[in-house]
Image (cartoon, grey):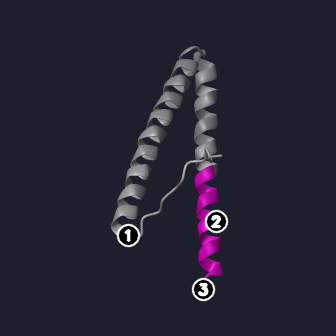
Amino acid sequence: MQSTAPSIQYSTNVLERRQRAAAEYLAWADHHAQEVARAEAAQVQHESHLGIDQRSAAAQQTIWARRRMHEKHLHDSAMVQLRHR
């Protein structure tokens, strides 16, 4: 009886492993960029169907969320720096 699981062979060559990792990262980055572009296009289509007041409110919520996320990032970064002193 033969196993149907694919055998994974790891190279002992560091350069080859790095090249393979770089290729995998580039493939992921391309896929991620496509997903982001699709999401942004869907968001624009959704917002174009909203009235002016609704678009303004949605824009304000988006700006508030980004500002809050930035504040949280700064806080977390400062806490990490303080911990590592």
Please give the residue where the numbered disc 2 appears in the rendered image. 76
Kindly state the secondary structure of the residue where label 3 is placed: loop
Q: Which residues are magenta?
A: 69-85
Residue type at tag 2: Asp
Is residue 6 rendered to the left or right of residue 54? left
Queried whether the magenta region covers residue 62, the answer comes back as no
Residue type at tag 3: Arg
Q: Nearer the viewer, residue 14 or 47?
A: 14
Structural distance between the alpha carbons of marks 1 and 2: 35 Å
Name the N-terminal-most of marks 2 and 3: 2
What crowding class fits label 1: few (fewer than 14 Cα within 10 Å), some (14-19), or many (20 or more)?
A: few
Is residue 8 rendered to the left or right of residue 14? right
Name the N-terminal-most of marks 1 and 3: 1
Quarter holding residue 74: bottom right
Kindly state the secondary structure of the residue where label 1 is placed: helix
| Residue depicted at 61% across the width and 82% down the height | 84
Kindly state the secondary structure of the residue where label 2 is placed: helix
Q: Nearer the viewer, mark 1 or mark 2?
A: 1
Structural distance between the alpha carbons of marks 2 and 3: 15 Å
Q: What secondary structure prevails in the magenta region?
A: helix
| Residue depicted at 65% across the width and 46% down the height | 1
x and y, in percent, of residue 36 in the image? 49, 36
Please give the residue where the numbered disc 1 appears in the rendered image. 14
Structural distance between the alpha carbons of marks 1 and 3: 34 Å
Name the N-terminal-most of marks 1 and 2: 1
Residue 85 disc label: 3
x and y, in percent, of residue 26 in the image? 39, 48
x and y, in percent, of residue 63 in the image? 58, 40
Q: Compared with residue 61, is residue 9 higher up or lower down, i.e. above or below? A: below
